[in-house]
Image (spheres, coloured by chain):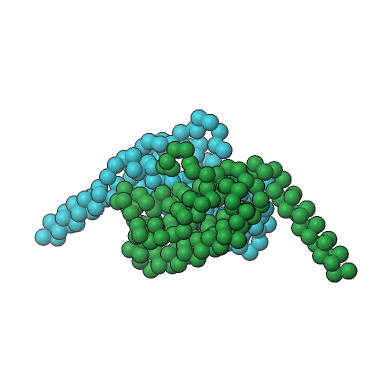
Chain colours: A green, B cyan
């Protein structure tokens, strides 16, 4: 009976996620919205570090990235290759999701430090976030360099 | 002496803000990053409300918008028309900035409600945010419909 109810629970789970992610293109679009959010905020931080914009929002930019990072994990859960995501995301899900967890932890830590002092956010700290390594492994390289 | 030191202080302020916003294009790029951040998160919320994505991140999406809204005020401070911003932004700065303040207040309130229950975020609530009215008045209409 326990196995049976487990099977039912699993079927219900499948049905629920099928209804929430009806269309593969929706899944791709949704995760793109999440990743672009982080991209825009990282770009804003880069501008501040390059003295192209004032630093007033710096701590908030980091806080927004820290709040957005956990969205990514949910967004990548459905196994739908496409967009810029390589199939390796799901083939190596344990590694990929571990990297997302470390992104969440690292951005959270940096956000806390930035709240204390905006000077905590440096180019080196930004570079140390696990963005690039993950992109190199799991993202189809963008055709044009990102703005 | 007081006037002189005030004059110096003002000159220093000008020099500081000139160095922080050296290039008008930087100003335009920076505020674009901020506005696009909100756009991506609003698009994610729309997908959830349309049942195209699961609701797990709903409260966090609203929280991210609430955290990003105050960035916009700083981003629009320099009087640099261009991008999608009409000159009216600065001609009617009192109205524009009041609208930004009400966006901050409204998103903050919705974020608090969403944290209590994701059901608080409805299409009507999203529609009630002061986005569209402000865009209609102060934004050059996008050529292609936004994705």
**Rendering coords of residue B139 (x, y %):** 46, 37
Nearer to us in this view, B14 or A17? A17
Q: Quadrant of the N terminus of chain A?
A: bottom right
Q: Residue furthest left?
A: B1
Residue A47 position, x and y percent, is 35, 49
B117 w.r.t. B90: above or below:
below
Q: Is residue B21 left or right of residue B127?
A: left
Q: Residue at x 50, y 30 (%)?
A: B143
- So how many labels did they put on this image? 0
Q: Can residue A115 be seen?
A: no
- The answer to whether residue B52 shows anywhere in this view is yes
Q: At x 60% / y 43%, what residue is drawn? A: A82
Is residue B111 rendered to the left or right of residue A40? right
Q: Looking at the rendering, which quadrant does residue B121 occupy?
A: bottom right
Along the line of sight, which residue is nearer the eye, A47 or B60?
A: A47
Return the residue nearer the eye: B117 or A61: A61
Q: Is residue B75 above or below residue A128?
A: above
Q: Left or right: where does residue A99 sit relative to residue B74?
A: right
Farthest-out residue, right: A1
* Residue that appears at 39% across and 53% down: A45
Looking at the image, residue A13 sits to the left or right of residue A78; the answer is right
Q: Position of residue A21 (x, y in %)?
A: 69, 48
Which residue does the image show at 34% across and 39% down from the upper left? B25
> Could you say which is closer to the camera, residue B143 or residue A97?
A97
């Amino acid at each position: 009976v326990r196995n049976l109810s487990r099977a039912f629970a699993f079927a219900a789970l499948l049905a629920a996620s099928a209804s929430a992610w009806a269309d593969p293109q929706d899944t791709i679009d949704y995760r793109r919205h999440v990743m672009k959010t982080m991209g825009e905020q990282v770009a804003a931080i880069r501008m501040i570090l390059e003295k192209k914009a004032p630093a007033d929002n710096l701590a908030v930019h980091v806080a927004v990235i820290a709040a957005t990072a956990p969205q990514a994990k949910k967004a990548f859960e459905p196994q739908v290759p496409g967009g810029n995501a390589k199939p390796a995301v799901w083939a190596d899900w344990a590694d990929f999701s571990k990297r997302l967890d470390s992104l969440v932890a690292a951005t959270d830590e940096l956000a806390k430090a930035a709240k204390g002092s905006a000077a905590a956010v440096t180019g080196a700290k930004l570079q140390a976030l696990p963005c690039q390594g993950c992109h190199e492994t799991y993202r189809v390289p963008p055709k044009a360099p990102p703005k």
